[in-house]
Amino acid sequence: MNKIVLITGATSGIGEACAKKFAVAGYNLIITGRRFERLLEIKANIETNCPVNILPLHFDVQDRKVVENIFANLATEWKQINILINNAGLAAGRDFFEDADIDDWETMLNTNVHGLLYVSKAVVPLMIAQKKGHIINMGSIAGKEVYEKGNVYCASKFAVDAISKAMRIDLLKHNIKVTGIHPGAVETEFAVVRFKGDKDKAAATYEGYTALTANDIADTIFYCAQLPEHVCINDLVITSTQQAGAYYFHKNN
Ligand code: NDP
Ligand code: 8X3
């Protein structure tokens, strides 16, 4: 059986690009997200070009019981997960601390932190049983530097950074690699989600410079996943050439 990669948040953006990249390399895929129609479309699209098996699982990573059930009932042939890409995540709103909506804060913490923990807790035993594995956690430049109006999104990604470091230490004895990927601005549906469908505000996020693309991040993740068994990229920060850190952009005139 080909190697299996599980990608959360594969219905758009970075996750979808990872699905395509790994499928071209012959990996079987477990792709997840809440939008089932999108998962089915992506599966059909990939299957027309690549001879791989794809299991679409639609669930909300915030729902602990559902996550536990889905992985407890995974068919045996899908249990040998080699790589987990914990990518599902979002920013909800971009507001000063005093104006921000507590529901948005809860959504971000429940998705970016709790969701990543629930999926990891379900998948880690499957990797321990194989005596190897690779977990790739999607952090952010927002998990390295706090910026104005980033408050709880930044906190959630700082948590991902800390969890990645903690996993790397605790899972060392199980031969499980842990890699944290921390991109700057990537042009995906991220900004549309953050600004709750306001396409003008979303477009402004990427104005005046060439942002990273989802494919840039998928290529980087794929590189990390292809290294020899004894090599583990721990932590990788990646930005557009026109971005340096969370604040500094060199925009076109
Ligand atoms: P997209 O909005 O394009 O993709 C987000 C993905 O996450 C979708 O597939 C979405 O699926 C899934 N998702 C969101 N919430 C849930 C949930 N509750 N349960 C299950 N799946 C969920 O954005 P990106 O591709 O840009 O984002 C991917 C990751 O990269 C996120 O963790 C984001 O924080 C991170 N990131 C993004 C950057 C950027 O500038 N774009 C930069 C740095 C990090 P669905 O809606 O179908 O559930
Ligand atoms: C997404 C990148 O700079 O909007 O994580 O926080 S940023």
Image (cartoon, rainbow, N blue to C red):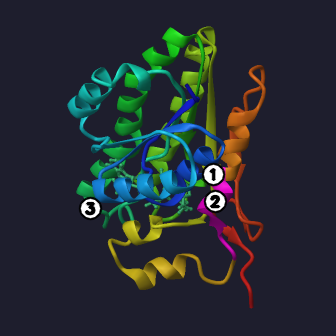
Neighbor class of circle 1 (other Cα within 10 Å; few <14, some 14-19, many 20+) is many
- The reply to whether dot 2 and dot 1 touch (C-beta < 8 Å) is yes
The mark that comes first in sequence, 1 or 3, is 3
Neighbor class of circle 2 (other Cα within 10 Å; few <14, some 14-19, many 20+) is some
Q: Quadrant of ligand 2?
A: bottom right
- Looking at the image, residue 144 lies above or below residue 82: below
The residue to which callout 3 is attached is 101
The residue to which callout 2 is attached is 215
Q: Amino acid at mark 3?
A: Asp
Q: CA distance from mark 2 to mark 1?
A: 5 Å
Kind of element beneath mark 1: helix
Q: Amino acid at mark 2?
A: Asn
The residue to which callout 1 is attached is 218
* Near-viewer residue (55 or 238): 55
The mark that comes first in sequence, 2 or 3, is 3
* Near-viewer residue (191 or 70): 70
